[in-house]
Amino acid sequence: MKIKFIMCLLVVIVTTMTVSAQRQRYFLNNQNDAEHVNMDYKKNEVRINLLGSFTALPEIQYERFIEDNFGIGAVVGIALDDYIETLEKFSSYYLVYGRLYFGQVKPAYGFYIEGNAGLEILSIYDYSYGNNNYSNRKLEGFTSGLSLGTALGYKFLSRNNWVGEISFGLNRIFLNSEDDNMFPRFGIMIGKRF
């Protein structure tokens, strides 16, 4: 699992390095609407979920801002341990999302709502032998499930383009899973806008 995580991390880093740091002129009205202030803002962002790192399910996120109040992105989460107490069946997940921001001062800043869709890779275990304890289980294989979800969050942005973010979401797994189930997504993230 660690090799998969390292490979995904390298792919994300190489991809983000090849994307040009495009800038767009952004006009912000002052309180009197008398004059406009020119601001350059960067349109790409990479974040890691610090909370996911503590649960052995690290998560890397990339976001591209389409408008000053809307962004699209992708999330990759890969389990580093074959058993995670809170998300027992997960091996990895891949999400795409769209976010609508409600901040007034800076582009893609402040409170947001998110809609997402994803692919989850789930581990299948056989508990039929032993005492049904997770240490006495046997990995039978993997299956996948498709999910839909939503999230709420708040994004902080520093003057030198460092980003902090807090989020909470809920996803439901549909197709091809053993049973339809819901799982929470929590995030305390740090990243860089470029």
Image (cartoon, grey):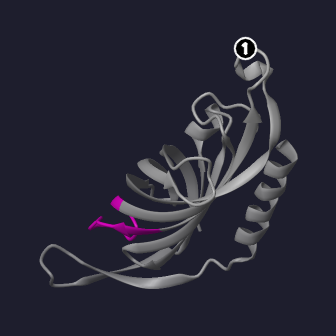
Residue 122 drawn above or below residue 112: above
Residue 27: percent from left, percent from top: 33, 83
| Residue at the (34%, 67%) spot, across then down | 101
Residue 141 visible in image: yes
Residue 189: percent from left, percent from top: 53, 47
Residue at the farthest left position: 32
Residue 91 drawn above or below residue 119: above
Residue 121: percent from left, percent from top: 70, 52
Q: Which residue is mark 1?
A: 131
| Residue at the (48%, 64%) spot, across then down | 116
| Residue at the (59%, 68%) spot, across then down | 194
In this rendered view, identify the residue nearer to me: 62 or 80: 80
User: In the visual, does 130 lie left or right of 169?
Assistant: right
Residue 180 drawn above or below residue 69: above
Residue at the farthest right position: 3
Q: Which residues are magenta?
A: 98-112
Q: Secondary structure at mark 1?
A: loop
Using a 10 Å C-alpha cutoff, classify the residue at mark 1 as few (fewer than 14 neighbours), some (14 to 19) or many (20 or more): few
Residue 4: percent from left, percent from top: 83, 51
Residue 106: quadrant of the picture: bottom left
